[in-house]
Structure formats: structure tokens, C-alpha cells
Amino acid sequence: MLSPEEKHEIDEELKHLPYKESAAIDALKIVQNHRGWVTDEALDDVGEYLDMSPDALDSIATFYNLIFRKPVGEHVIRICDSVSCYLTGYENLRDAITKKLGIKLGGTTEDNKFTFLPIQCLGTCDHAPAMMIDDELYRDLTPEKLDEIFAQYK
Amino acid sequence: MPTIYIDDNPYEVKEGKNLLDAVLSLGEDLPYFCWHPDLGSVGACRQCAVIQFQDEEDEQGRLVMACMTPASEGTRISIQHPDASQFRENVIEWLMVNHPHDCPVCDEGGECHLQDMTVMSGHNYRDFRFKKRTHRNQDLGPFINHEMNRCIACYRCVRYYRDYAGGGDLQAFAAHDHVYFGRHEDGVLESEFSGNLVEVCPTGVFTDKTLKRHYTRKWDLQSAPSICNHCGLGCNTIAGERYGTLRRILNRYNSSVNGSFLCDRGRFGYEFVNDDARILTPVMKNVETRQFEEVSEDDAVAKIAELTRDKNSVIGIGSPRASLESNFALRTLVGSNRYSSGMSNAETELVNLSRQILNDGPAHSASLKDVEKSDAVLVLGEDLTNTAPMMALAVRQAVRNQPVEKAKQAGIPEWNDNAVRELIQDEKGPLYLATPTNTKLDDVATKTYNAAPQDLARFGFAVAQFLAEESPKVIGLDEDVKSMAKSAADALKNAKRPLVISGTSLLNKSLIQSAANVAWSLCANGKKAEIALTVPEANSMGMSFLEGQGIESAFERAASDDIKTAIILENDLTRRVDSKAWNQFLKNVENIVVIDHLENETTAAADILLPAGTFADSDGTLINNEGRAQRFFQAFEDDSAVQESWRWLQGVLDLGKDTDVSDWYSLDNVFSAMTKSVDTFKGDIVVAPDAKFRINDQKIPRSPYRYSGRTAMKANVDIHVHKPPQDPDSPLSFSMEGYSGKQPSGLTSFFWSPGWNSVQSTNKYKNEVGGELRGGDPGIRLIEPKRNASPKYFTEVPEPFSPREGEWLSIPLHHIFGSEELSAKSFGLSKRAPEPYVALNPSSAEKLGLQMESRVSVKLDGTEHTLPITLHENLPDGVIGLPVGLPDFNGIPLPNWSKISGATE
Amino acid sequence: MDRPLTHHIQPDKQPLSLKKYEKQGGYQAVQKALRDFDPVDLQNHVKEAGLKGRGGAGFNTGLKWSFVPMGDDAPRPKYLVANADEMEPGTFKDRLLMESNPHLFLEGIILSAYAIGAEKSYIFLRWAYHLSKKNLEKAIAGAYENNYLGENIQGSGFNLDLHIHISAGRYICGEETALLNALEGKRANPRAKPPFPQTSGLWGKPTIVQNVETLANVPGIVNNGINWYKDISNSEEDGGTKLYGVSGKVKNPGLWELPMGTTSREIIEEHAGGMQDGLKLNGWLPGGASTDFMVEEHLDVPMDYGSVMEIGSRLGTGTMIVLDDQTCPVGMIENLEHFFAQESCGWCTPCRDGLPWTEKILHAIEHGEGKMEDLDQLARHSKWLGPGKTYCALAPGAVEPLQSGLKYFREDFERHINEQRCPWS
Ligand SMILES: Cc1cc2nc3c(=O)[nH]c(=O)nc-3n(C[C@H](O)[C@H](O)[C@H](O)COP(=O)(O)O)c2cc1C
Ligand code: SF4
Ligand code: FES
């Protein structure tokens, strides 16, 4: 069942869309915001609300990079692996994070605190290399700066 | 007609086509994947590349996708151009990157579009030297096998399943080279048309799971053109056999009937043919032990001849699932006034009424193609997905016609599939559905009306009244029903090709009459209206031509002293009459002769039982709901005593000497004896090329000439070449020998063309893509309207339905899987049939104090059934629905009044 | 020097409030256009100014607008969509405008919508651009309050609604027709053209998709006229200014508004401060990941659409990615092809199955497992993944750095193969 908040947020999107299915991506993002990831149950819930099959929704969910169909940790680290960050040392940064958290790209720490993912160019190439933790952008990174950054997520 | 230039040669092509369609229609070869004759173009696979030149001067040209480029006047292309052919070769190589080299163990092998295109494109060596990606496969239920690693991502499956057939549970997932086609989790594919994936998929991702259980390569199948015998629509099929068992059913293209597709009942319902319960030898009951004992064929026939010496003491009960010829033979044996159609009185009346409407009225009896082409549809009473499945699929296409017309006006050609869908979004042409409860077409309906059958008929009469003053008035109609009737009437009147659909499934005469009134009133408005009336079984309409009486009347007759013997032809009467009547009948007649192919309660009651051929091992003619006579041919003949029912009866007749049947040695002769002696068949009717038909003095082979065993068709028995069975009934041979060119329309045992081993070779058999088969679509219409007849409107408007206190009107609910006798016995289908239930609406359930899991006891005609309930939101008050054809409900006449109460357990 | 795109931007990059923006001449263009221009006139005006799309393709903006059906029987509603997806690696220009000059962007949207008679507008925004979202939302609220959006804008009878759609992330969403599918809540596969979005776009209605920077150019053109616009450019053909950026190992990576047609030398050496100490310039991608490499000999080519095209590359987004001599070109190209292969939507065969193949070959070469034939394979793929062969422009873009890399860094490729290792590692 969608929560009243989820329903309300989806309704807000529907207001400016001509067809119910047009809200599919928004609705998936909304339930992901509330539930952390898009569970099978969430597909059913959204499907019922938008008159879509869970299969049709999953087709959309699995297309996009930012919709999770698997659980993620409390914080999601996204490190940019695109060209400008590659040129400015993203690989060192990646290895440093792996060492620090003990997880490779795609992994989640055992305490479920962090999930570590790659992301495409963050559009901040003049301050490469960069990463995001949740909605927070970190740029001009060096491995040395990581301790301070991760300290905020204790 | 635009002229286009292909490699500098001019060709005339039809207006409005794309280049791929045009090239294929010209009979030329050009490889493709994502395009499909029924699904249009999307330009995804990039396989159909050609070089297009701007004009005569342009020497450079540019690469275009033929499927996405209009074939307009003066278009110049090159197929041969090295850039085009190299690119096409590259496309194959890319597709092969992840495709496994598993052709030897792949079910698609030998009829694989990917194999064909690979050869056609010239790709033969792969440079890819890295690891392939792999996928997990899914369990998609009893019909379809899934092997995702073979996928080449042409997107045809989802486009067919979702866009064409309206299914929601097969989708494309993920992106880049991880795209995956399947369900979001394992599970049965919900669509009733899932089987077409087998033919739509160009490779071995979706294959026939029922075939897998007894797999044979296409080239080792002995196949014959057949007609589906699982509903009244008469879809054209190909039945394939090996070593005495039927292995699969494929679609057989017929542009007027089923086009490129079949429903899952038709495709997967065949396995009863191989059932252990097949009757293979004549048997007679030992008078003392009451056990069956084998008898020789001659003795059996002689015995029956003896019993039928006095015609006046015999009745014959025919069958709507048997051929015209077999029914006719029975009718000849017992005389027309002692011959029964084998349908209930009610059904007989309705089928006769239908034929009368189609024959005498001005409205044209619609083929499935006509249904698909119609642009406004009214359905009265029929739950088409369950009673005439392929008609539902056709209606699903029909609702697109009006919006597609708009897209065309906006300059988007109909074949530009995604662009058309984008422009029309969820807009649908008019479809008005009046049915007792929800149906699977509701999602595309303009409006639905759920009510008791007689109220549906009143609605129909009301629509007609809005169209023609003379059509009778309906008094006391609710305002909202009236306004829906008005809008349906307007939609039909404003359409170019309006269509009314009704049928026999609710066994309600008024419904059919109201449908006739609507169609006729449209004609009176100057419209070329179409009417489609569904009938229950493969030869129900044929029965009406033979004018037999209903079973109840036959039983009454049997009650008179003079009747001693009954001959029952391919009919399990216990499914049609209640047990009381059946038991009484058994008491009334001394000798019961049954000819059938599967053991059932009726064969169990026989004194003499003869083995009949099924559609797969006999030949015959059927008439579908449209009035189209079509012939099915046997795919095989085994060494058992099985033969066409009419052959058994010919033997009996021959001994009786009353009628000269000496020339009944072939189907053609029986058929022509019938058309000569039965008044309803007028004139010379040619259903299919006769048995003497030859091309270059050769018969048409049933197996392709790549047959592994060559002529040793019985390699399972021994490797010697047996003399192939003779086939006096058709111009087909039981071998790979004969004319190896394109078989004429109606005699197509397999679609094959050089370089085209897959079903896509059908394009080579058509006048043009999507058009008729060369030489005309097989079959012949025996019913044509009297266009100028002034309508004689039916005048009896039924009273409104009023619920009764303490009693419930039980109406039949049909199931594509389970309601039909023969298919229900097939392996896959039996798994999809529902358990018996009683359906009622939630408020009724509440009134009765029933919960979801409740069981109720239903008292009907003196029988009592304890059943779980199913809630149907929209079933009217005072009405319950019972699934027809399921074992529990055999012989219960519906509709009927019943009593229900919460079961005490 | 006129800097119409950035002159409102304050040193701290905080956006101006609506009032302050108005004080600096903001929204004058809207007032003027609604008052003085008939929509079709506005189309012609922008066409003549020679504004070319800044999203990468460089198509004349006014000309594109002229394909939209106008008049009373045109289908309704029409849509204007701002393409703020900016996912092209190495590109970071639209972000600046949205974060620091949102009102200029909105003004561009309003003007463009007016020009085509659109009454609905969407900003298709990258998820990662949180600050952009925040600043835009504030600006939009202000614009509604001050009747620059909403009903009967400034008493002109023109209505416009504007919504932000946050992308769920995929590079292909930036392709204009894929973007439309994403806006419709579907899988973002591109669409075939024709029909073009101008006639059948969002939900089948006439639609214009325009890059953020392109839109931000429109107010200046309206305010100052065609001649001014041509004059502020250094280019013969193309008008206006351009946001040029540099990333990679230069001293001072960044983004600058400069006259269209400024040379790479000026941008890299002056504005970006040249290479970091000890590094040499080895080449650069002129306008994002999907453009062909340029090398030293091209330093003085004016960075405008025609000139860059002439030397076999594309101006693209005008944000340059600089390769230094201590970074392996093969590794860089492998990184690029990895991106493109991952971001293929999976619709058409060449891109879906061809790009991963090139990535695998590049990986093999970079990791000492290359063969000489691999270079032919790469060339073959480049050829058959080029323009017109695939369904959309993603794959042709993907092979630009690959084919030009093979041309300019052939020796480096061969060294990898001969030595069976990466000489840089
Ligand atoms: C794969 C691909 C990605 C694209 N990404 C963007 C993008 O992020 N932003 C953008 O403005 N244009 C992008 N484009 C270009 C758009 O398709 C389109 O040309 C542009 O939005 C039109 O606007 P303009 O004429 O103002 O440049 C992309 C094109 C392709 C083929
Ligand atoms: S080139 Fe083809 S597969 Fe690649 S993104 Fe475009 S449409 Fe999708
Ligand atoms: S058949 Fe033309 S692109 Fe697929």
C-alpha cells in the first residue's frame, strides 16, 4: 500500500501530466525516497495506483541508473568515473575508498552504512575528481581529503 | 502506383509502403529482424540497410533502413551496394556477439530466422574473441520455453505481446547490452495469445514448450494444412507429426481468417490427439460381462449394418465437432428426419437463427479480417477472449483504426509503428461492450455495460431503435443505458465500417436478434454494416446446413418404441444433456453405436465402439461461424484401425445397399454427394483442390525435402523404406516426394522458400506483405448477404431481468482454457484451466454472508454442487456465473435458475 | 566585452533575486517580445541572428522553431522543453547558468515558448544538479509571482506553465527524442525521425527541445538585436558568445564566456593557464566526450561550428577535455568507450553490441593483451557505427574520440600491442 505521503506526492506529479503512466518514473523515485529502494511490493503498489503492470514498471525501473531495485546502505557514495575524473586521478580515489571502507564498487559495507557506486560525469569537471554522498557533492578530491569527509557520516 | 528503382531496375509498387515491405512484396530478398509484417517498422535492428540515392546523379548515396523509408515515386536504392551489404554483414556479426553457438540443441534450429538472415547476409566467421554475457532464463508456464541467451534484442516479442496483443506482463528490462525480455519475475505468461511468441521471435528465445516434450525438427515433421477445431472461428493451422504422434500446431497464414496468429487454445490444445485414451480398435461389449472386446473391422461394420437394416428403428446423432462429410454420411444412413445435429435444442435453434440472419439479411457476415478492419464495434453478450479468442485479438486491432487514420492524415504512415503510437497515445476508436461481467477487452472499450443477458439484448434493441424507427421500441430503459445506447448508435452510424458482434455463448436468442436489428438498421442507413456471430464449435455452422434436430428432440424420438438403435458420432452427449435425460435415453434404446476418438462417458455406454480419426489423422470439411467452408487434411495415418467416421459409415451403407455409395472412396466424392443432395448447399462448391489435383503431375509432399530419414518415414520402427500410405482424399503425399515449389494456397503443409526456413517465408506466399495468399485465401464463403433485402426486424423485445427472491439466474461463463472439450485434455491447457467455482458479485456475497474463501452449495436442476466462490465486481444482482465445460458442470443446461446457500462443511 | 550569458553572475556565484535581476535589465526581453513581436517574427529574428544549438548539434535555433505548426488549427498543447540533462562527460556549462543565473534561463524559456506558441514547458534536469534545482525552483516561484509565468503573462494573453522534471539518470536521456520518452515516464529509447518533435513530440504534440545555454542566448538577441549578436562574435558564421570550458590537468580548469570563435590556444593557454607544471599538451576533445580529438596543430583553429568541423571534429558543447602526455591515450579512450557502451540504450544493434566490443578490445590492448588485428577491428567498428548507421547519434558520438584517437595516437596503440603492456603504467 502506498502511504498517504507517497500518494500525495504522486498526485502532485499527476496534476501536470496528461496520462497516468506518465508519472511512472516520478512515482518510482517517490517510493524510493520513502523506502530507500524500489521493492517488489513497491512495484505492485505503484502499479495499482497508476493502472500499470508491475512488469511494465520494472521495465522502466531497470532502465534508469538512479532507481534501485536492490537495497542500498544508509548512505550512497557515487564516485564519478568519467573522463575528466579519470584524467585527474579517479582511480586512486576509488582505491582509497575501497581500502577505507572495505568495499569495492557495487558493494555495501557490512554495517549497511555505505553503498559504493560509480556514476557518470557529475558535470563538475573543472573540479575533478568528484563524488557525491547522497545529495552532497564533493569536488577537487584527493585521497587525503577522504578522512575528513567520511568523519561527517559517523 | 509509384515506380521505385532497385539497383537501377524499375519496379511498380503499391502506394504507401515502406521499402522493406515493397522489396519483399516484389519477391526480392532483404534481411530484417525488428520489422514484422503485422507489427510495422521501428528501425531498431538496422538489418534492412540499403543505400538510397537522391536522384540519378547521386553516386554516393546514403545508408538508410529500408523499413523506415517510404517507397515513394522515384525512390532509388541499391541492395547490392557493397556499403549496404557489408553493413548488413556487420549487423549480423554484432548480433552474434552474445548469441550462443547452440544451434544443434536449439529448438529453433532449421526454422530460425536468425540462421536464415545470417546466411543471407553472408556473415560466416566471427572475430569476437571475448567472453559472452549470459542471462538467467525464466519459467514462463506450460506453453513457452525461455532461453534468453539466444536473444538478439529485436524487440519483436514485447511489441507483439504488449502493443499488439495488449499483454502487460512481458517487457523489456535493463539497458545497453543487458536488455532482457521476460517477466519481472518467473510465472505464467498471462496473455491468451502468448503462443505467437514462438513464431514472432526470430530465434530460439521463446519456443513451444509442448513441442519440447516430444521434439522434432521442422524438416522431420510430416505436416498438413489443418483447421483448428477448438472454437467456431476456423483458424488455419499446420499440424505436424512424427512417428505417429502429433508434435505441434503452427499458424497457417490466411489473410481472411487468422492472419499470422493463433490463440493459445488453438496452438497448444492439440495433445488430446496423442492421449492414452485414444480409441484405436473397434470393440464390442460382451453381452454377459459388459466388457469391451476387440472385434474385426468387418465384423463391426457388419454388425452395425445388421442393426440399421430397418432404418426406421435407428436414430443418428451427429456432432458439431465432426466434419460435414461424417455428419452427412450419418444423415444418409439414418435419413434426414432421424438425424440430429448433436447440439442441444437451444443451441440448434440459435445456430439456425444465426445462419438465417447472415443469409437472409442485408448485413455482411464478417470474416476475422473484416473484424480487424472495422472502425466501430458493438459487442452484444460475448466474452470474446473466452468464446472466440482470435476475434478478441481482431477487435483489439480494430479500435486502432480511427486513431490511425488521424495519424495518416498527420503524414505519419501506418507502418511507422512507434510514431503512430506516439501520436495516438491511448486514443481508441469506438468499442461498446455489453457483457454480463468484466471481459479482457474492457481495457480498450469506449464503454462497457454489464447486465443480465436479457438486459443486454434490450440494450441491443435500444441501439437499433436509435438507428431505425421501425426497429421495435424498448420500454422502461434506464436513462444511462439509453444514453450509452445512443452513443453506441451514433458511433456506429458515423463509422465507415461498423461491426456488430454477438453469438451463442449465453444461449440467448434475443441477444442475437438484437444484434441483427442493429446491423440491419445500419444497412438501412446506407452503411455497409458487418455482423459477426460466434458459434460454439468448429462445425456448429455446418450443422445448421445439415439441418439436424436438437438432441432433446432426438431423445424424445428415441423414447418411442420403434427406435432400437442410436448411432452417436464423435459426440460426448453427457456434456450436453443432463444425467437424467441421458440415463433415460440409455434405457430407451437397445443398441448404442459410438464412433469417436477419445474415451469418454458416452463411449463407455457404447455397445459397439469404432475408432475415428481426429483432425490430425483424418480429412474433412468444416464451416466456420462466418459461413466459410474450409478443409483440413490429415497429417498422418498410422497402422491402427482409425479412420474417418464417414469411412466407417460408408462401409455400413455399402452393406445396406439402400444407397449407392460405391463412389464414396474419396472425400471429394462424399462432399459432392452432399452438395448434390442437401438443399442448403447450392451448386458446385470447391472448398479445396481435389484429390486429383497435381502440379507437373506431382502430388504435394507433406514433408520438406530435407527430411533426415529421407524416405524411411518409420525409422522408429525400422530403417526400411515402407510404401507410403496412399491418400485417396487429398492431393498431398505422405512423403517428401512431389512438387517442391510453392504449394498452392490451401495445400500448404509448411512454409518454405529458398533461403527462408522460418515462418517468415510466408511473405513469399503472399501477393504482397499483409495481403492474400497467392491464388487466393483458401476456403470458400457459403453465406453471402442479400444486400438489397429490406430488413425484417425482430420484434420481440424481452422483458427486463428481475432478480428473484431466493433464486439466482445462473449463466454460463466461458474459459479459453477448460471450457472446450478436446483442448482441455491437452497437457499444457489442463494446467491453465480454472477449478470449478461459482461467481457472484460482492454485494450478493455479502447478503449471503459469504467471504472470499467461502464455499457454497448450488442446487441446479436437482443436482447439487459445492464450490468455492469467486467475486465478480460487475456481475449483476440476482445472477451467478458458472464455468461451462469443466467436468463438474457437464450436462447442466445453462442459463437456469438455481438456489444457493453457504455450504456446511 | 559583452557577456550576455554571465554578466549577471556575481563573484560568489549566488543567483540574483528577481528584483535585482530586473534592475539589471532582466525580463526586459520578455516585456519587449510580448509587446513588439509576433511569435513568427520572433522566430525569424532568432533565425537571422544565427543562434545555433549549444547542446552539441549546432542546428540553427530559429529555423528549428519555424517547423512548428502555428495558427489556430495547430495541435494543442505545444511544448517547450529545456534540455538540462548535461550528462556529456567533460561538460559543465549549463550547470553554471542554472545555479547562478536562473532568471536568464527562465527568460529564454519564456521567449522561446512564446515564439512557438507553447503553453507548457518542462525543464528536464539532471538528478545530480541539486543546487540548480533549488535555485531554479526559487526563480520559478518568483516568475510565477511576478506573472512572467502562469496565465496571461504581463497582460499579453500568453499563458505558460513550467515544471521541473528530475531525470532518473541515463546519458541517452539527453538525446532530444529519448528525453521526450523519459518525460512521458517511459524507457528513454530515442524515437525515429521523421516525424520530428517539432510536429509530433511530447505526447505526440508539437515540441521544441532546446539546450539550456541556447535558451539563455535568446534574451540578449531580443534585447540587442541581430547585428549586435553577430558583432560580439569572433566568428564569421556563428553569432554570439560561447561558454567555453577546460578540464583535465591544466593549471586553472574552468568555464568562461568568450566570443564565439575564440581559439583553443587562447582558451587553454590564457584562460586555463596552460598545462600543469611538468606536463605537455597531447591533445584535447573540443566539446565533450563525443567529439574527435584535436591536437597541437589545431591550436589556432577558431572554436566555432564550421571551423572545427573543417578539421574533422565538432565544437560539440565547447567544453574541452585536455589530455596530457603522462596519461595513456588508450586508457582515456577505453574510459570513454566504457561510458558510451554502458550508456547505450540497447535499442539498436550496432550501438548495443558494437560499443561493448570496442570497449573489450581497448581493455585488452590497455592490459597488454592486444593484437595488431584489433586495430583493424576498431577501425571497422568506427566505420560502421558512424552517422546515419545507428538509430540515434549516441554511437556516432562514441566513435569520434575512438576514430580520431586511432589516427593521432596510432603509435601509442601499436606500442601497447608490441610491448604487451601499457607504456604509461
Ligand atoms: C546521446 C546524446 C546525448 C545528448 N545529451 C544532451 C544533453 O545532455 N544536453 C543537451 O542540451 N543536448 C544533448 N544532446 C543533444 C540533443 O539531442 C539536442 O540536439 C539538443 O538538446 C537540442 O538543443 P539545441 O539545439 O539547443 O542544442 C544529446 C544528444 C545525444 C545524441
Ligand atoms: S545508437 Fe541505438 S542503441 Fe545507441 S543509444 Fe542510440 S538508439 Fe540506443
Ligand atoms: S527491419 Fe529495418 S531496422 Fe530492423
Image: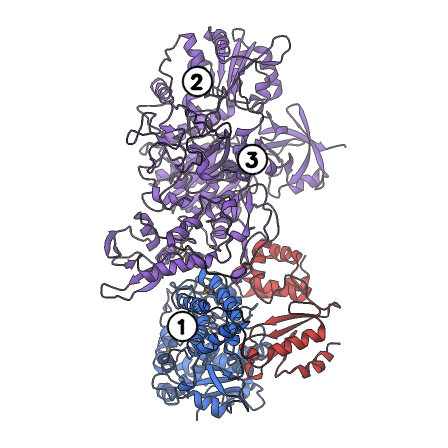
Q: Residue at x 50, y 28 (%)?
A: B244
User: Can you give x and y, in whole percent of width and height, for residue C253 in the image?
Assistant: 54, 87
Please name the amino acid that badge 3 sits on: His
Chain in red (letter): A
Check contact, mark 1 vs mark 3: CB within 8 A: no
Chain B in the picture: what colour?
A: purple
Residue nearer the viewer, C61 or B285: B285
Q: What residue is disc 3 on?
A: B814
Q: What residue is disc 2 on?
A: B647
Residue at mark 2: chain = B
Tag 2 secondary structure: helix
Discs 3 and 2 lie in a common subunit: yes
Tag 1 secondary structure: helix
Residue at mark 1: chain = C
Gap between marks 3 and 2, in whole Å? Answer: 34 Å
Please name the amino acid that badge 2 sits on: Arg
Q: Is residue B595 above or below residue B79?
A: above
Residue at mark 3: chain = B
Check contact, mark 3 vs mark 2: CB within 8 A: no
